[in-house]
Amino acid sequence: MQGTTKHFALTLAAGAAAALLFAAPFALGIGAVAPLTLTGVPLMAAGLGLGLLLAIGAGLTGLVLVFGIAMLFALSSEPIVLFAGLFFVPVIFAVQQLQRTRTSSLGYIEWHPPLNVMAWLLAGVLVAMSFFAMMVIQDNTDLSFMARSFLQPVVTGVFPELGFHRTRELIQALTPIFPGTVVAVWLLMLAIATAGALALLRFYGALKRPATRMEDLRVPLWIPAAFCLSVLFVVYGDFNLAYLGQNAALALLVPMFLVGPEPSMRSHAARPLPT
């Protein structure tokens, strides 16, 4: 009973911490955006330390609190959607994957590598991005024009003090790398969440899987292959394909920046479970 109560309290605390970190820039302004990058750490720690169901509980707690904060500050529904899409759903997927194991032919227990999880999430985003781009291209619409039209109200709302000319310059600078930069920043926040949660749980002795070493991190070969294809789109495609290619390449650079490609999906850190 005491253990159940403790786990319940930790679940609520993780959800509350995630909600407060995420809501900081919405409540205090864009200058408080730094805490938002740590939003995934308590959610990931709850999942890897307490289990998938408690991670879901922490995420739902965070959603409820974000909804309350949005109501308190008379915000729209965007913070709730962003919290769910950027952190809650991806972290639940990551926790489920990071808890997977298999037994090698030598009898070792192999754990799912973190960068393979990032690769799956990135693959889903790239498929969605490509599908949306193809629909836009079929309608003879310029992708960069759509990005500029989307960024105009966003930049104006976030930075109302810039004025017309500086706002236009900022939009012109962001348009060629949107949404690729957004996806890249999101992947980096998930990497921070995973690394932070693993370090935190290891410090407190609550880590249920072996800690991943940098030399053991690998990405599947489709990552560099997709990057090369994106570069070909930039060099030989029309303006829409070039725009899609350069943004996809930006997102694909994140896992390639963290480690190099490895033909084998098998982790070199295969080791027996501790007894």
Image: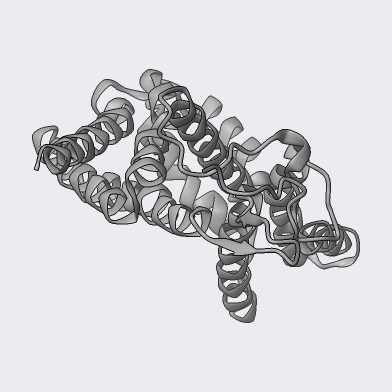
x and y percent of residue 180 in the render? 63, 49
Q: Nearer the viewer, residue 244 or 207?
A: 207
Give me the residue at 62% from left, 56% from top: 109
Outermost residue on the bottom side: it is 138
x and y percent of residue 122 in the render? 61, 57
x and y percent of residue 234 in the render? 84, 58
Give me the residue at 73% from left, 38% from top: 258
| Colour basis | one colour
> Against 129, is 10 above or below?
above
> Against 20, is 90 above or below?
below
Q: Is residue 95 left or right of residue 168?
A: left
Give me the residue at 65% from left, 36% from top: 173
Res 214 quadrant in image: top right
Q: Nearer the viewer, residue 81 or 105?
A: 105
x and y percent of residue 153 in the render? 40, 43
Q: Nearer the viewer, residue 55 or 1?
A: 1
